[in-house]
Amino acid sequence: MSDRERVYDDAGMVGHAHDLGDRPALLVVDLQKGETDPDEPLGSDLSTVVENTNELVDVCHDRGVPVVFARVVYRHLDAADGGLWVEKIPALMEWTTGSYPAELDDRLHVKDGDHVLDKRHASAFHGTELGSMLTAMGIDTLVVAGCSTSGCIRSSVDAAAARGFRTVVPEECVGDRSAEQHEAHLWDIDAKFADVLSMAEVATYLRSIATPPMDRA
């Protein structure tokens, strides 16, 4: 057992999993060109994450499970709606409406019925319609994919758990520009906020949904 494992085990933070609900939704966070194009200042090669996420998106489309694609995009040329976050990460000031880095990755299997959500901070819940929309849909379980594990995934997962959603992170469907940060935060997310499961386990769960959630009384 590693030192990290021992610390978490001693604190009783290992082995506690949620029971998954029967009204899930899939949240795909920030798989946009500013993150997935390695030539962009904040980009890295997330091809595998995009490919794996598409597998879950396809399952959701087949089962009638709602899919939300969140992206960081600013409405003003000076990114004033980004607040202090753009001071910490100045490259975000280029992620304005209609810009290349604000566009969703072309490889994503986005369908007309999916919801594209514009956010301005790390959490997909902060200052957006996401929470009220999921509540109105009767969602009880949120599957979170995308990037980056140490930033917007962690922040969105924390916010989801705080709002009472059973939260699941498919391990192969999240990524980070830093492999070290990815590993550390994924471990911590699993201990504190969500269940980190394999993509295969999550796909099996989504396929088990007998009736599309939006069709239920």
Image (spheres, rainbow, N blue to C red):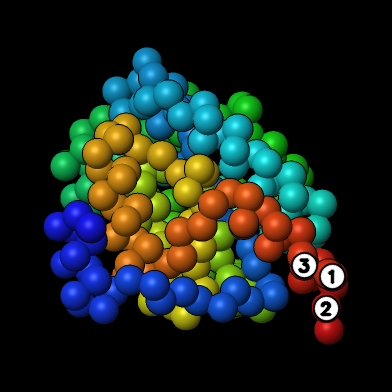
Q: Residue at x 24, y 39 (%)?
A: 180
Residue 215 image offset from top left, x and y in percent: 85, 72
- Residue 87 location, x and y as percent? 16, 42
Amino acid residing under circle 2: Arg
What amino acid does circle 3 point to? Ile
Q: Residues within 10 Å of mark 1 (few under 14, many from 20)?
A: few
The CA distance from mark 2 to mark 1 is 7 Å
Q: Residues within 10 Å of mark 3 (few under 14, many from 20)?
A: some
Q: Is residue 22 above or below residue 52?
A: below
Compare residues 139 and 97 and report the one nearer the observer. Answer: 139
Q: Amino acid at mark 1?
A: Thr
Q: What is the quadrant of residue 66 in the picture?
A: bottom right
Q: Which residue is denoted by mark 2 in the rendering?
A: 216
Rate crowding at label 2 as few (under 14), some (14 to 19) or many (20 or more) other CA atoms within 10 Å.
few
Furthest-top residue in view? Answer: 39
- The answer to whether residue 91 shows anywhere in this view is yes
Q: Which residue is mark 3?
A: 209
Tell me if 94 is positioned left or right of 24 in this view.
Answer: left
Q: Which residue is mark 1?
A: 211
Q: Secondary structure at mark 1?
A: loop
Looking at the rendering, which quadrant does residue 107 occupy?
A: top right
Instruction: Tell me whether the residue at label 2 lies in contact with that at label 1, contact meaning CB atoms closer than 8 angstroms.
Output: yes
> Earlier along the polypeptide chain: callout 2 or callout 1?
1
Q: Quadrant of the C terminus?
A: bottom right
Q: Is residue 130 above or below residue 83?
A: below
Q: Is residue 69 left or right of residue 122?
A: right
